[in-house]
Amino acid sequence: MGIIFYLFGAMVLGAGVNGQRGLSNLVVLDVDVDYITIGWTVSPGWNVSSYRVRYESWREGSYRDLSPAPGVNDTTATITGLHANETYTITVTSFGANGEITSQVSTEEVTDYYIMSVLCDQTHMEISFPLDGLPGVNAAGLHLLDSSCLATVDEYYVTLRTGLQECGTIQENYGNDKFRFRNRALAESELDSNGAQRYQPFARPFYCEFVRLYAKSLERNLLYTVPDSSLQFEIEHGNNTFTFDMHLYTSADFIHKYETQDYPVQFLPTDDMHVGLAVQTTLTNLELFVQDCTATPTSDKNDGTRLDVIDNGCVTLY
């Protein structure tokens, strides 16, 4: 197996025939996810009968020529239909009246990343792609693992949305403290007018993560966030949390709860307390249980004076 070293940067080479001056200063004027605009300088009095702009992708390995080519008086050109985050070698060549090469300059440039946005909530997951970052992709045919779940397309974005248990979404426990919901955005490549397939089929996995462990207190409202983690290459994900409710109820039937105006609620040491915990979700296979329950004389859950009622899922106080 060979080893290929990739050096990212830009270099410019310029030369005329027999050391004469000609084209020089080939620079990138603008770059985005799907195009590169270049500009160059022509020596005063240098005669150009025609130009050729040739560009080659490091990944694809084959070159193409810009069509139509720049006019003889042009000193800029825009190459479109490029791949996002791809390195291109671009060469501008001038030709004389007899079709001979008279000067040539080259440079390398990397197109921009396109940003995929993944959103998660307690019932749905959504991924959006900018249209200009999907060259050669049949955007209207973009779908999830369940091919009947198609994307919606507007002027700028392609969006896929699904419930957490729909469209082929895979649900799994991840590590010791998270749920993960996985799916994939899939599409066939568009065909040229002659039926040729120029691009590879499109496939991008994405997922949403929810934490499984929470701290909840009757004394105050807490805001829960999932720590950010770095995106994996070609795998996009989003984070969110479920909403939990915890209330103190007036009896063991858990029908009526104490309202705000009822607090502080007073109990005798021999009284039973009825605490209800619920999670807001549409998931049908989610099981909620209490792992730890601790009573403290203050709102500080780490107060040194504490009474463990439930420890690691086991009742410790009778």
Image (cartoon, rainbow, N blue to C red):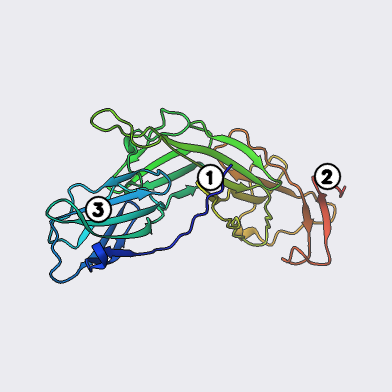
Q: The residue tagged with tag 2: helix, strand or loop?
A: strand
The residue sitting at 78% across, 62% down in the picture is 296
Measure the C-alpha gap from mark 2 to mark 3.
73 Å
Q: What residue type is labelled 2?
A: Cys
Q: Name the residue under label 3.
A: 53
Q: Is residue 309 above or below residue 62?
A: below
Looking at the image, tell me whether mark 1 or mark 3 is earlier in sequence order.
3
In the displayed structure image, the side of residue 129 where residue 303 appears, left or right = right
Evaluate if marks 1 and 2 touch, with contact meaning CB atoms under 8 Å apart: no
Label 1 packing within 10 angstroms: few (<14), some (14-19), many (20+): some
Q: How crowded is mark 2: few (under 14 residues within 10 Å), some or many (20 or more)?
A: few
What is the quadrant of residue 147 in the picture? Answer: top left
Frontmost of labels 1 and 2 is: 1
Q: How many numbered dots are placed on residues in this image? A: 3
Residue 43: percent from left, percent from top: 19, 70
Q: Indicate whether 193 appears above or below 97.
A: above
In the rendered image, the residue lying farthest to the bottom is 44
Residue lying at the far front of the rendered structure: 18
Q: Mark 2 points at which residue?
A: 314
The amino acid type of the residue labelled 3 equals: Val
| Amino acid identity at mark 1 | Gln
Q: Mark 1 points at which residue?
A: 122
- Mark 3, Cα crowd under 10 Å, few <14 / some 14-19 / many 20+, is many
| Above or below, comparing residue 82 to residue 36 in the picture | above
Q: Position of residue 38 (x, y in %)?
A: 27, 61
In-front residue for pair 114/155 = 114
Q: Which residue is painted at 82% across and 52% down in the image? A: 309
Q: Position of residue 221 (x, y in %)?
A: 61, 60
